[in-house]
Image (tube, rainbow, N blue to C red):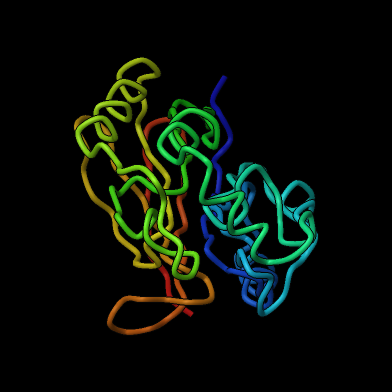
Amino acid sequence: MKNKNKKILIFGDNHGLINNIEKIKSLEKPDITIHTGDFNNWNGEPNNYDINYLENNFDYYVFGNHNIEGKTVKNFENVDKYREYMVNINHIEYFLKKDIKLFKINNFNFLLMHSFNFDENLITHYGRIKYSFEFDKEKWYKEISNIVKEHNIDYIISGHTHVPEIIKFETCQVLNPGSIEFPFQENKKPSYIIMEINDKEVKINKKFI
């Protein structure tokens, strides 16, 4: 039996705004929705929506570095306490072992993670506090490579950089939809990715608002 054709909507890094999420979901009418993380901002600005929005509105999602373990600033006494909590999390262990999703759509295997790119910004922001450890870049990509090989991954879906791109990593493609609200690329347009999948073919399109 053939699998049904699927239209997949991928976006993320909205950081506390949901207007474009609702707009694009209504426009594209996808079969499957995927969020790459950082639904809220770590400091609760400009908004701080209920994290359950992810569970209720997306088929697959990760939390990202602004909502580690699904927490928001509302879970803490104040912003400083939340920042201290995030700083003390081992981000390598967390992003590569805990805050990932593995799933299959039709005949294709997916790895969803917040940040594929080794990015030193992960260890230097949240105000003036810096982490007390350093990333091991070699280990970072070796761990990802091991996951790709073990699970025969066809597509890695990742966000964090706020820049849309489609690149090759070993035997798979890495899809980054950019940011649906706070784009960093040159054209400064909010972006997302549409995948159209059947049993044998995948069409991938970067789109801009």
In the rendered image, the vertical position of residue 77 relative to residue 175, given as above or below:
below
In the rendered image, the vertical position of residue 125 relative to residue 138, given as above or below:
below
The residue that appears at 45% across and 71% down in the rendered structure is 191
Viewer-proximal residue among 187 and 139: 139
Q: Which residue sits furthest top?
A: 150
Q: Residue 115: x and y, percent?
A: 40, 48
Left or right: where 164 falls relative to 8: left
In the rendered image, the vertical position of residue 30 relative to residue 202, given as above or below:
below
Q: Residue 81: x and y, percent?
A: 67, 58
Quarter of the rendering containing residue 42: bottom right
Q: Residue 13: x and y, percent?
A: 52, 64
The residue that appears at 48% across and 77% down in the rendered structure is 182
The residue that appears at 75% across and 55% down in the rendered structure is 51
Viewer-proximal residue among 79 and 110: 79
Q: Residue 134: x and y, percent?
A: 30, 43
The residue that appears at 52% across and 35% down in the rendered structure is 100
Which of the image's four quarters has the N terminus? top right
Viewer-proximal residue among 166 and 93: 93
In the rendered image, the vertical position of residue 145 relative to residue 177, given as above or below:
above
Number of marks in the rendered image: 0
Left or right: where 11 falls relative to 53: left
Viewer-proximal residue among 80 and 150: 80
